Amino acid sequence: MKLAFSTLGVPGMPVRDVARLAAASGYDGVELRAHPEEPVHPGLAPAERASAAGEFRRAGVAVLTVAGYVRVAEAGTDEPVLVGLRELVDLAHDLGAAHVRVFPGGGGPHGPEPDPEADARAARRLAATAPYAAGRGVRLLLETHDSHRTGADVARVLGLVSTLALPPEPTAPPEPVSPPEPAKPVLPTPGPGQPGPPSRGPGLPAAPPADPGLPAAPGTVTGRAAGPAARRRAVGALWDVLHPWLGGEEPAATYAALAPHLGYVQVKDVASVEDTTTLPLGAGTLPLAACLAPLVRAGWDGWLCWEYEKRWYPRAADLPDLLGPAREHLLRLLRGARA
């Protein structure tokens, strides 16, 4: 498996320093928090995007994800959500990121539980954006979070996405049956000195070719690129191991629900179910070994990304000094799961 860390753990750190830190600490990639208070966000100009992508390329570090804050299940009209999704997809494409992280955000007026229409809103918006994301080479990942904290919750939405994003492929209409041609009249053979029928001389233009149709607009997903397989790959799941655990879902059950959709896994550690203060990996009570075990048993070989929530817990220890020990801890857990 490949390892990454989230820039939520190094709030405000310049892009060049993030890239160098990842390379020096032995991490393969980074998850970039996309927020106006960070160096990377949808408002970046094209030159700034190219510069950021160049920093990671030169460091040999992959940009795993643009971690956005669009809430696909929130109440309200679709258009602002769709605009936000497309902006994040464009940013991910320009940075060379494989994924865009989105939140559910479908809590009802009286608490975090989703309102009855939350699933349908989320699925409709993800399905509507899937062809655009596929055309840009980016996958939208719905995180286990807030109103949809368990694997079962997220899988329920993604099941709806499949029904909305994968309509039956159109079939060609049947060829019309042409009526039989009427018999051609037999023309009398011209006699001596009488003109024959006109022929198509060399000066006449050839018959025009069949109309090939208008070319597709740049960036339009057409033909096979817009087919079921491409659209299915454009939407998936991000397993944040904390929230299903807080929701009482066993890790094996979470993996079983998300396996058909899984993009990658966010790992973390906290003090307890009651105290979710972020901690170095291995210092808390989150059953990380139990979360990794079903991945190893299934032969899953994707990304593990450490999301250390320094931004929300400013008194927490600084991330750079924790990256090396965290990497060793993850590798040790993976070795133990394979034993």
Image (spheres, grey):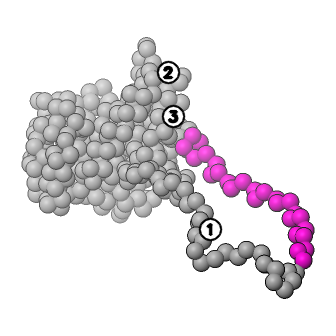
Q: Is residue 189 above or below residue 185?
A: below
Give the position of the C terminus as an image quadrant: bottom left
* Tag 2: amino acid: Asp
The residue beneath circle 1 is: 207
Q: Main secondary structure of the magenta part?
A: loop
Q: Which residues are magenta?
A: 163-188
| Residue 137: percent from left, percent from top | 38, 53
Q: Is residue 62 above or below residue 69?
A: below
Does the segment drawn in magenta span residue 84?
no
The residue beneath circle 3 is: 124
The circle on residue 115 is 2
* Contact? badges 2 and 1 (CB < 8 Å): no
Give the position of the N terminus as an image quadrant: bottom left
Q: Residue at x 22, y 36 (%)?
A: 43
Q: Is residue 111 above or below residue 181?
A: above
On screen, residue 198 versus residue 281, left or right, reads: right
Instruction: Give the residue at the far top of this rendering.
Output: 110
Whichever of callouts 2 and 3 sits on the residue coming sooner in the sequence is 2
Specify the quadrant of the image occupied by residue 182.
Answer: bottom right
Q: In the structure shown, which secondary structural element does the residue marked by tag 2 occupy?
A: loop
Front residue of 293 and 154: 154
Residue at mark 1 to residue at mark 3: CA–CA distance: 48 Å
